[in-house]
C-alpha cells in the first residue's frame, strides 16, 4: 500500500500551529492578524469559499472583515475599496474572491492590491519574488503541495518531476517551486500542457507526478512509474446515487489503480484541497508578523 498523503490532517496540524502562535501574540499584547476578503456578487460557490475562509479565521483566533459588493459595482468602486484596505493599517491581508463579473478586469484589481497584503500570492510582485526564490506569499495551492511534500519528507532533490497543466495558479508556480534551489526543490522539472506530445511516455518517467489539468481520472496506471509520488490537484463532482448528497468527488487521477503503483499519493477529497485555507491563514500570519517584506 502506498503512503496516503493526508491533506485534511496536515491542514488541521497547520491550523493548530497558527492558533498556538496567535495565542502567544495575544499573551504578549501583540497585534492579532486580520484578514479582509472582498466578495462581489452572489455566486454560490464563491460565497461558500469565502464563508469557509472567514470561519477558519475565527477558529484560529484571527480577526476578519468581509466586504460584500453588488455584482453591478463599477470597476472604479472596487478599485477604490481595494485602495482603502491597502491603506488601513489594521488589516494585514486582503483577498478578492474570484471570479469577478465580466465588466471588471481581474488584472487591474489584482495589480491594485498592495504586495505586502497580497496573501493570495497573485500579484506580479509576489509571483516574481517566488520565481527569484525571495521571501514571498506563495499562492495557496502550490504552497499547500510544497507543505505536504515537506511534512511527508518526500525526497525531491535530483528527482524528475513532471507537472501536467501550466495554469498561473497551479502548474506554472509548481514547476518553478520544484526546480528552485532548496527543499522541496532541486528537481529536474518537465512542465507539460495540452500541446505536449508523448505525454504518456513523459509521465512514465516521473519520480514525482503533479497533476493539475482539470480532466476527471485522466491519469491512469499505465502512465505512472512504479514507486512514483503522485499529487492530484483536480476536483470534479460526479453523480453518485449511492451518496446522500447525490454526488462524489474525484480527481484528475484514477486513484484506485494508480495507488497500486505509487509509493505515495494524495486522495481526492482529503488531499490537496483542504490545504488551501491553511495556506491562506499561514500567509496572513506572515503578513501580520512582517515576515515577507520586513
Ligand atoms: P486550468 O486553468 O484549466 O489549466 C489546465 C491546464 O491543463 C492548462 O495548462 C492546459 O493546457 C492543461 N491541459 C488541458 N488538457 C490537457 C491534456 N489533455 N494534456 C495535457 N495538459 C492539458 O486548470 P487549473 O486552474 O490549474 O485547475 C486544474 C484542476 O485542479 C481543476 O480540476 C481544478 O478544479 C483543480 N483545482 C484544485 C484546487 C485545490 O484546491 N485542490 C485548486 C485549484 C484548482 P493549455 O495551457 O495548453 O491549455
Image (tube, rainbow, N blue to C red):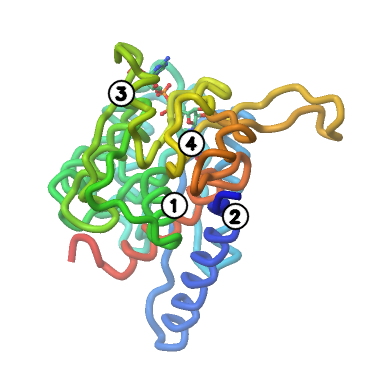
Task: Name the residue beneath numbered marker 4.
Answer: 233
Q: CA distance from mark 1 to mark 3?
A: 35 Å
Q: Which residue is pictured at 39% across the width and 20% down the height?
A: 200
Q: Earlier in the sequence, mark 1 or mark 3?
A: 1
The answer to whether marks 1 and 3 mark residues whose Cβ atoms lie closer than 8 Å is: no
Question: For disc 4, does the CB lie below 8 Å from ligand 1?
Answer: yes
Name the element at disc 3: strand
Relative placement, left or right, of 54 versus 30 is right
Label 2 neighbour load within 10 Å: few <14, some 14-19, many 20+: some
Q: Earlier in the sequence, mark 1 or mark 4?
A: 1
Q: Earlier in the sequence, mark 2 or mark 1?
A: 2
**Foreground: disc 2 or disc 1:** 2
Ligand 1 quarter of the rendering: top left
Instruction: Where is residue 147? Give x, y as percent.
Output: 40, 56
* Horizontal side, residue 223 vs residue 142: left or right: right
* Residue at horizontal 43 percent and vertical 53 percent from the top: 280
Q: Which mark is residue 49?
A: none
Between label 1 and label 4, give the one nearer the viewer.
4
**Label 2, label 1: how many angstroms apart (C-alpha)?**
24 Å
The disc label shown at residue 36, or none: 1
Would residue 234 be found to the left or right of residue 158 on screen? right
The local secondary structure at tag 4 comes to loop
Ligand 1 has an atom within 8 Å of the beta carbon of the residue at disc 2: no
Q: Tell me the crowding category of disc 1: few under 14, some 14 to 19, or many 20 or more residues within 10 angstroms, Cα based.
A: many
Q: CA distance from mark 2 to mark 4?
A: 14 Å
Write down the residue under mark 2.
8
Amino acid at each position: 500500500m502506498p503512503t496516503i498523503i493526508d491533506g485534511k490532517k496536515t491542514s488541521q496540524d497547520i491550523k493548530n500551529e497558527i492558533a498556538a502562535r496567535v495565542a502567544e501574540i495575544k499573551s504578549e499584547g501583540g497585534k492579532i492578524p486580520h484578514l479582509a476578503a472582498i466578495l462581489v456578487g452572489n455566486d454560490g460557490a464563491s460565497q461558500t469559499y469565502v464563508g469557509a475562509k472567514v470561519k477558519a479565521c475565527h477558529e484560529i483566533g484571527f480577526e476578519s472583515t468581509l466586504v460584500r459588493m453588488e455584482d453591478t459595482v463599477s470597476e472604479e468602486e472596487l478599485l477604490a475599496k481595494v485602495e482603502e484596505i491597502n491603506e488601513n493599517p489594521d488589516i494585514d491581508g486582503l483577498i478578492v474572491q474570484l471570479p469577478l463579473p465580466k465588466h471588471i478586469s481581474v488584472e487591474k484589481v489584482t495589480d491594485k492590491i498592495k504586495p505586502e497584503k497580497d496573501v493570495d500570492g497573485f500579484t506580479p510582485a509576489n509571483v516574481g519574488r517566488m520565481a527569484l526564490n525571495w521571501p514571498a506569499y506563495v499562492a495557496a495551492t502550490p504552497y499547500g503541495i510544497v507543505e505536504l511534500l515537506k511534512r511527508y519528507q518526500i525526497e525531491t532533490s535530483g528527482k524528475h518531476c513532471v507537472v501536467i497543466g501550466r495554469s498561473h495558479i497551479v502548474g506554472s508556480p509548481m514547476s518553478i517551486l520544484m526546480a528552485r534551489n532548496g527543499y522541496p526543490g532541486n528537481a529536474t522539472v518537465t512542465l507539460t500542457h495540452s500541446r505536449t506530445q508523448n505525454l504518456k511516455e513523459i509521465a512514465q518517467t516521473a519520480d514525482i507526478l503533479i497533476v493539475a489539468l482539470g480532466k476527471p481520472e485522466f491519469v491512469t496506471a499505465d502512465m505512472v512509474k512504479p514507486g512514483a509520488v503522485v499529487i492530484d490537484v483536480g476536483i470534479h463532482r460526479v453523480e453518485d446515487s449511492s451518496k446522500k448528497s447525490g454526488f462524489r468527488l474525484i480527481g484528475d487521477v484514477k486513484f484506485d489503480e494508480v495507488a497500486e503503483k505509487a509509493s505515495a499519493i494524495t486522495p481526492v477529497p482529503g488531499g490537496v484541497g483542504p490545504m488551501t485555507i491553511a495556506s491562506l491563514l499561514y500567509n496572513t500570519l506572515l503578513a501580520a508578523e512582517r515576515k515577507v517584506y520586513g
